[in-house]
Image (cartoon, grey):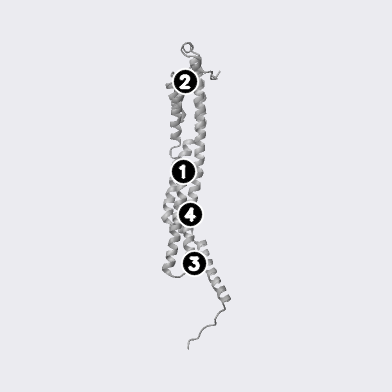
Amino acid sequence: MNQRGPTLDPVTETAVNVATQAAGAGEIASTFDTATILHLLWIGRLTVVPLALCSVIGLAVIIQQLVRYAGIDRRSRDLTRGVVDALVKHDLVTARSLCESAKTPLAGIFLEGLRWRNIALEDLNSVLATSRSEAITELRRGLWILGTIGSLAPFIGLFGTVWGILKAFHDMSVQGSGGFAVVAAGISEALVATAVGLLVAILALAAFNYLQVRAGAIAGVFARSCERLIQALLYVESASPAYAEEKSEEVRHGRPLPA
């Protein structure tokens, strides 16, 4: 005759079950604490690999743009000051030489302005605006990559998390046991993908916004420099006798000129 152990009352049995699950959760937490991040990243390599590629590409773009923007404001202001001073002294050769030796996109804009200096004022403004727009577009080249990474990285991480959760439930159904312990282990590994995706996106978007602001500030410097160039060219032409004969007051339209 089979002998049965003592039967537990419902309250005691519930307490034992809770304690067992808590012990399993504690074991999982201990395992997660001692597991290295590299191990978790290797487990989630399905999404971590593309996220790593995104981070490398984004870092390369950030470094490239920072190098491109470094000192461009100061060099542009120095060039503007030198060119305006040369034009006021009617020294067109020096003005061209300064533009040819300057290491700033503004130099190309100024060369276009000097080349077309004898056309009507409205046309000259159009030439400078076109050259300025091309220079700013070139400065912003590559920023779209950071914007794309910032928008895409969280979804890549989310995909990795969903995939990991699906895998955890599949493993539990295959094993037929384990319950909370199996699911918790899978979810903890899957959430690494979301964390990495958010980190990559935050860094990419922060860099994108900063570089956009820097490009806008540089565009403002270029616009003000072009205004000063036009004023200097008008001053040079107004000082020649031929200008007084050929140009009307409407063309000059009272723009303030440097003394």
Q: Are marks 3 and 1 in contact (CB under 8 Å)?
A: no
- Marks 2, 1: nearer the viewer: 2
- Label at residue 194: 4
Q: Which residue is mark 1?
A: 147
> Element type at marker 4?
helix
Task: Mark yes or no: residue 144 visible.
Answer: yes
Considering only vertical position in the picture, is 5 above or below 187? below
First along the sequence among labels 3 and 4: 3
Q: Position of residue 12 (x, y in %)?
A: 57, 76
Q: CA distance from mark 2 to mark 4?
A: 57 Å
- Label at residue 121: 2
Q: Amino acid at mark 4?
A: Thr
Q: Amino acid at mark 2?
A: Leu
Q: Are marks 4 and 1 in contact (CB under 8 Å)?
A: no
> Element type at marker 2?
helix
First along the sequence among labels 2 and 3: 2
First along the sequence among labels 2 and 4: 2
Q: Residue at x 49, y 22 (%)?
A: 230
Considering only vertical position in the picture, is 82 above or below 161? above
Q: Position of residue 142 (x, y in %)?
A: 43, 40
> Element type at marker 1?
helix
Q: CA distance from mark 2 to mark 1?
A: 38 Å
Q: CA distance from mark 4 to mark 1?
A: 18 Å
Q: CA distance from mark 3 to mark 4?
A: 21 Å
Q: CA distance from mark 2 to mark 3?
A: 77 Å
- Label at residue 181: 3
Q: Position of residue 148 (x, y in %)?
A: 44, 45
- Marks 2, 3: nearer the viewer: 2
